[in-house]
Image (cartoon, helix red, strand yellow):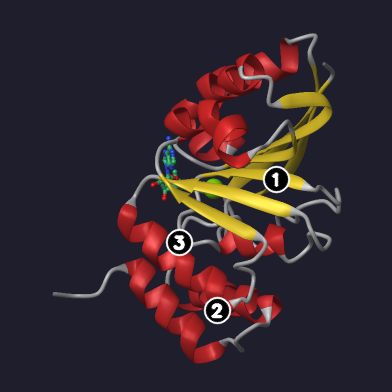
Amino acid sequence: TRSTRPQRLLKAVQKNATRGDPQSVISAIDHFCRHSEWAMNIGDEKVVNELNPEKVLELGTYCGYSTVRIARLLPPGARLITLEFNGDYAAIARQVIAWAGLEDKVQLVEGASEDWIPRMKEHFGIETFDLVFLDHWKDRYLPDTKLMEDCGLLRKGTVLLADNVICPGVPDYLQYVRNSLSYKSCYFKSHLEYTKAEDGLEKSVFLG
Ligand SMILES: C[C@H](C[C@H]1O[C@@H](n2cnc3c(N)ncnc32)[C@H](O)[C@@H]1O)NC(=O)c1cc(-c2ccc(F)cc2)cc(O)c1O
Ligand SMILES: [Mg+2]
């Protein structure tokens, strides 16, 4: 059978990127997406701010592109936990993360966000997160944000960074973080990865 897009993305990484060099992995995936195929990553325009977080949670790993983008910026000892419920994608992402040499900073968990958010404390010994990157099914952003609040995983100053708030769009989530007194929210206009369509990131700081 014909290979899948994630499998072709992984091949492009193994062919064009240098083991242990995260930047070369990012460039290989950018090149693959921009010139050969479109994949649902955060694009090379949506730069993740230098927040210097110690504890990061990513919802929706896909092929691990944004995982590598974030993890390469983490200081020594910092950790990124990323959740992906599609086993095929998780298998690809694991190899992309390993190729970048970031496996000791990244913990990829194969499972659904709604099942694993309540287990962060007892299973990973996580008190609170410094940064959460929301990039999974768009109708899960709001329920999972409320779940993280209820599980006490957000602290004063935790940053929620939500991808695709315009395209495909997350209207219920935007309405919540922009009107809730518990968040200070701002929008970073960008483009849907590798296209001219408008998209953007919403950055929301939890006020406690
Ligand atoms: C949702 C996907 C990303 C991944 O998330 C995993 N996932 C899901 N729900 C859960 C969960 N509840 N727990 C754990 N993992 C979970 C999944 O399996 C995908 O691998 N991303 C997108 O769909 C996505 C789509 C577009 C896009 C834009 C314009 C178009 F015309 C079409 C598509 C752009 C983007 O930038 C995206 O990110
Ligand atoms: Mg996305």
Label 3: few (<14), some (14–19) or many (≥20) C-alpha neighbours in 10 Å:
many
Give the camera-side residue of 45 and 104. 104
In percent of the image, x 55 and y 21: which residue is there?
Answer: 142
Asked whether, in this view, residue 162 is left or right of residue 195, the answer is right
Residue 72 drawn above or below residue 19? above
Number of the front mark, 2 or 3: 2
Residue 185 drawn above or below residue 8? above
In percent of the image, x 53 and y 25: which residue is there?
Answer: 118
Circles 2 and 1: CB atoms closer than 8 Å: no
Amino acid type at image mark 3: Ala
Place residue 65 in its image quadrant. bottom right
Circles 2 and 3: CB atoms closer than 8 Å: no
Give the camera-side residue of 161 and 200. 161
Tag 1 or tag 3, which sits nearer the N-term?
Answer: 3
Q: Which mark is residue 56?
A: 1
Residue occupied by mark 2:
99
Q: Mark 2 falls on what kind of element?
A: helix
Residue occupied by mark 3:
39
